[in-house]
Amino acid sequence: MSATGLIVDRPFNRVIKWPAMRSLNHGREGVACALAVIASVLFTTACATRVPARTTPAPAPVFRTPPPPTQTPQVVTDQVADLIAASNRHFEAGSRELQLGHLETARNEFNRSLEVLLESGYGARSEPRIRDHFDRLVERISAYEISALAQGDGFTEKPYEPASLDDLLAVATFPQPDATPETTRAVVDDLQETRHDIDIPLNARVLNFVELFTGRLKNYLEEGLSRGARFLPMIQEVFRAEGIPLDLAYVPLVESAFKPNALSKAKAKGLWQFMRGTALENGLKHDWYIDERTDPEKATRAAAKYLKTLYGMFGDWHLALASYNGGPGRVQRAMKRSSRDDFWTLSTGTKYLPRETRDYVPLILAAVIIAKNPAQYGMNVLPGPVQAFETVTVPTATDIRRIAEWAGAPVQAIQDLNPELRRWTTPVRGNDYALRVPEGTAASVTAALSGSDPGELAPLNWHAVKKGETLSTIARKLKVSRSDLAEANYLTLKSKVSIGQRLIIPRAPALLLATRTDSPAPVAESRSLDAVAAANVRGPRLEKADQAKTLYRVKRGDTLYSIARFFDTTVASLRTWNGIRGSAIQIGQRLTIFSSRGNNTQ
């Protein structure tokens, strides 16, 4: 070691520089450091002297670049698309509610479908996609209005189903196949084992209709028996109390297939297919609002009364059935002309009774045979569910669509429970109408009734009679049927009206698109600030003396909807007044608008 602090490693000719010895005086730390360096060198030298080895160059150090910090990707949202999607959700919800007959809820949803657009920063006209969506939405709701008007409103009589007897008798006019030996044997065995309380002769006419019912018309009979399962216990109870043969409980199987709303071509109606006059004679009520022929229980009691009367006249159930179909007068005249008092001899030819009556009795008897033992004839009867109900008292005329909404049930369910109602409103005359509602809903319906303004429960239009007016002139002026006008007010066609008398106008408030709301809208949308409604009410047609005619020039940004809102009318009215088929209008186009003089907009 030299004084300079160098250690020469002669065999390998390497020089290692280390600190001068005087640096050791800096402390123990320095000494420890120097000794460690020397030991390392000596150890390396000794290894190299003893074991010659190939030296491998040390790998170059690898420097890893740290990854950049992870950044959360920003999701770019399309606010316009989101607004349109939200609007569509409300529209679809409104469509579903409208299908159920829930007009108030539907109207609210349709309102919201436009309010989400009107209340946005874009408005309804500034952004092209929103403008197109807004216009399409108005057109779609307008289409709902047109469809609803075609289907009828609260004052249009509800639709009825065709009576099955018309079809059965039409089939019976064609030659029928003869009963097979198997069918004949089944009927013979059945009549020996099954007790019947009316006489059923085993003749070809009855057997041939059994063959028809178990063959070509099997599905018809299965459906009728399945539908009638819920009515038969009630019918049998009434007949048992009145002393009527229980076999006759199956007469509706042929008359109506147990459809309460069945209507024949001759205007007979209900389970028992009563004509209006016969129904009134046997205690059933009928007016513009109700028709008890379609109430199963009330009609059954009337049928029991009528059948008992007919049996008292003829003393024979076959002749009583013939007169139930053809009328007692016709059967009596046929008996007098033929000097016969037995149905089967009376009906052998075409001279005395019409074909319908001749076929009617064997049809009934064939249906009774199968209905009392359906399994033996291969019938698959599947009774439907029985709708449990409660009764609420309705204090005044009420739209049953409101009842359905309060009960949370489809309007069809309310109609099915109250088939005697001819229209979608309870009777105007008389308070405390007993209305059936689904079980478990009476409390909510009663609470809603008590909290509602009686004047808003039914969409009624009124007219105050003026000097010189009659039912005819009022009907002509307001474009309604004179008979409907009279019936709706419990009047006859010859009734006189007095000045000031208030008459109900039987032209229902049609579904109205536009309805005012309290929702604020941007200033730019001030002329179309209200949302579209699917089911509001429209007042009666204005009389010419009370009308004001306005010519309006279409401005940029106008739509039929916005103009209708501004003038408090409807899109449908604008189309009618101006002969517009679609929704296209042009800037500068002049539109004719009629409005009340008191509400005329300048």
Image (spheres, rainbow, N blue to C red):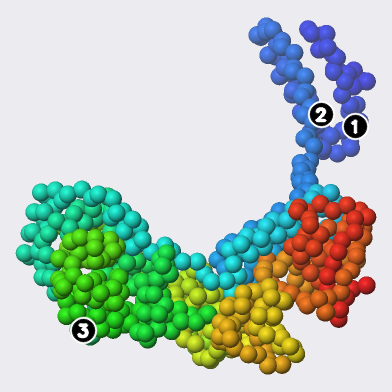
Quadrant of the rendering where the C terminus is positioned = bottom right
Residue depth check, mark 3 versus mark 2: number of the one nearer the observer: 3
On screen, 83 above or below 66? below
Going from the N terminus, do you reach mark 3 or mark 2 first?
A: 2
SS class of the residue under badge 1?
helix
Q: Position of residue 483 (x, y in %)?
A: 58, 78
Mark 1 packing: few (<14 Cα in 10 Å), some, or many (20+)? few
SS class of the residue under badge 2?
helix
Q: Position of residue 584 (x, y in %)?
A: 81, 52
Residue 335 visible, this angle: yes
Residue at image point 78% right, 77% down: 543
Give the residue at mark 3.
312
> In the image shown, does 509 or 378 lie closer to the viewer?
509
How far is mark 3 from mark 2, CA to CA? 141 Å
User: Hey, what amino acid is under mark 3?
Assistant: Gly
Residue 361 lies in quadrant: bottom left
User: Hey, what amino acid is under mark 1?
Assistant: Ser
Residue at image point 10% right, 61% down: 202
Mark 2 packing: few (<14 Cα in 10 Å), some, or many (20+)? some
Give the residue at mark 2.
34
Q: Position of residue 220 (x, y in %)?
A: 31, 57
Give the residue at mark 1.
23
Which mark is on residue 545? Answer: none
> In the image shown, does 28 or 381 lie closer to the viewer?
381
Q: Do callouts 2 and 1 mark residues in contact (Cβ within 8 Å)?
A: yes
Q: Do callouts 3 and 2 mark residues in contact (Cβ within 8 Å)?
A: no
Going from the N terminus, do you reach mark 2 or mark 1 first?
A: 1
